[in-house]
Structures are given as C-alpha cells and as structure tokens.
Amino acid sequence: MRIARFVSGDNPAYGVVELAQDNGDHPETISVLNGDPLAGAVNFTGERLALDDVRLVAPVIPRSKIVAVARNYVAHADELGNDVPDVPMVFLKPNTSVVGPGEPIVYPRLSSAVDHEGELAVVIGRICKEVPVERAHEVIFGYTCANDVSARDLQKSDGQWGRAKGFDTFCPLGPWIATHLSLEEAGDLEVAVTIERGGEVLERQRASTALMVRSIAEMVSFVSAFTTLLPGDVILTGTPAGVGRIEPGDVVHVDIEQIGRLSNPVVAQDV
C-alpha cells in the first residue's frame, strides 16, 4: 500500500492511495482512514476522494527524531573528499525540518552554498531497542523519499552538522509511505534527483540503494543499539554521488522507483 497524509478542508488525515498504474482507467484516488496508522489500528471510513482534490503533506511528522546515516555510498564520500568511516556516522535532524511534497525548501540567509541530497527514508513502525539485523524487517513500517538538504558552507565552517542540516524545511519527505516493499526490494531501488532550472532539467543523482555500504537492516540495528526508536521515527539511509547546489527558483525532484516522486520548489528566505 501507499499511505499518505493529506489535507482536504481544514484537518489532516491519512489515506491509502490508488494510482492509475494500479487501477487501469479509473481516476487516481485516496481512500480515507479513520486514524493514524502509526499510532494503532485504523479502518477505512468508506470515503474516497480524487487525489487531485486533496493536498498531500509530509506522510509522517516524526514524534521523536530523524536519524541520518552519513557517507553510506562510497562514490559520494569520494566526491567530497571523505573516507567511509569504519563505524557508521550518524547525525540528527529536528522534526521542525520536515516538510511535505510541494512545500518550499527555504534557502536561508545564513548560507550561500545549499545542496540537495536525495535519499531513501525508512519509517519505523513500532517501539524498538537493540534490534538484531535479522529482525529489522519486523520494526519497519515502510519507505518514502527524502531530501537531506545541507548548507555545505556551514557544515564546513562549524565543524559539526547540526546547524547545516537542521534548518526549517531541510528535510522534505514524501509523497507517501510505501508499505508494500520487502526489505530485499528496498535494498535495490534506483534513487534519482533532477533539478528544474530556467526551463532546463538537470540530472544530478542516479544510483541504486544496492550500492549502500551498510544495508537497511544494519542501519536499523546500529541506530537502535544506542537509542530507542519510536513509531514514526525516520532513518535516512545516505545519499549517492551527484549532490549539488540548489538555488531559489529551482524545483528539486527526488524519484525512487516503486515509491514515487518528491518535488519541492526552492525559495529565498524573506528579508
């Protein structure tokens, strides 16, 4: 299933998305659920809306944390002149950095070198601690697209990454959570990033999650060894080579096969 969070009217709700590729000639729809699937059992309400008539928002607002794994693709570490660490390198992004599909990435006044980083995101579905690698699949709710937006100049000058990667809007997620993928399938998906700029489409990143240094299961096990994971927590699995600058006026697209497309315009911060 593809579980989305959406707004129709005043209140956000969850629903199951049915795309044209699933249902042939029928219109694309979202079937409304009566609760939060990450908080407990839900049922269909019987209401079905046209997907074009609703506004999708971030499919999950982490109640606790976003844990990102750095330098998890050899080619990306190489392009920035870094080594792949012997022990996974992780950092946290605040939940206030999350925005959904179509929402703007705000280019902060404090930076002059902001990069995109397209990534596969893992959404945790249950409280867990010290998860063995072989049981990681039991705690994963699903997968979505992510953009680990980074102020590269601040990352370099600060000597740590909290500010550079923690600005509001620096963690777009969406468009929905794919719950139908197995752990093995998620470990071999194409991740691509393209930029629309001035009428041109610029291809930036294209690689398979099969090139990750640490597998999804290894990352879940490593992170849960030092922090309790809660339903709705997100693990960002690292970005492949090809990261590059974004500018106000751009539209950034993160495409992951079998999941979907996450698109966000870039706007300058108000003076």
Image: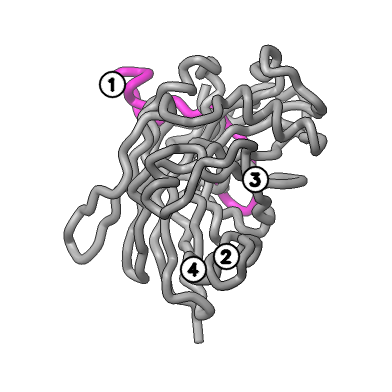
* Residue 35 percent coordinates (x, y): 72, 33
Give the foreground label among 1 and 3: 3
- Mark earlier in primary sequence (2, 1): 1
The reply to whether residue 35 is visible in this rendering is no
- Mark earlier in primary sequence (4, 2): 4
> Amino acid type of disc 4?
Val
Q: Which residue is mark 3?
A: 90
Can you tell which quarter of the image residue 136 is in? top right
> Amino acid type of disc 3?
Val
- Say if the magenta span includes residue 228: no
Q: What stretch of residues is rendered in magenta?
A: 8-28
Can you tell which quarter of the image residue 129 is in? top right
| Cβ atoms at labels 4 and 1 below 8 Å apart | no
Q: Residues within 10 Å of mark 4 (few under 14, many from 20)?
A: some
Q: CA distance from mark 4 to mark 3?
A: 24 Å
> Amino acid type of disc 2?
Ala
Q: Nearer the viewer, residue 247 or 215?
A: 215
Q: Which residue is mark 2?
A: 164
Give the foreground label among 4 and 1: 4
Q: CA distance from mark 2 to mark 1?
A: 45 Å
Label 2: which secondary element: helix
Position above or below: 24 against 234: above
* Residue 97 percent coordinates (x, y): 61, 58
- Residue 106 marker: 4
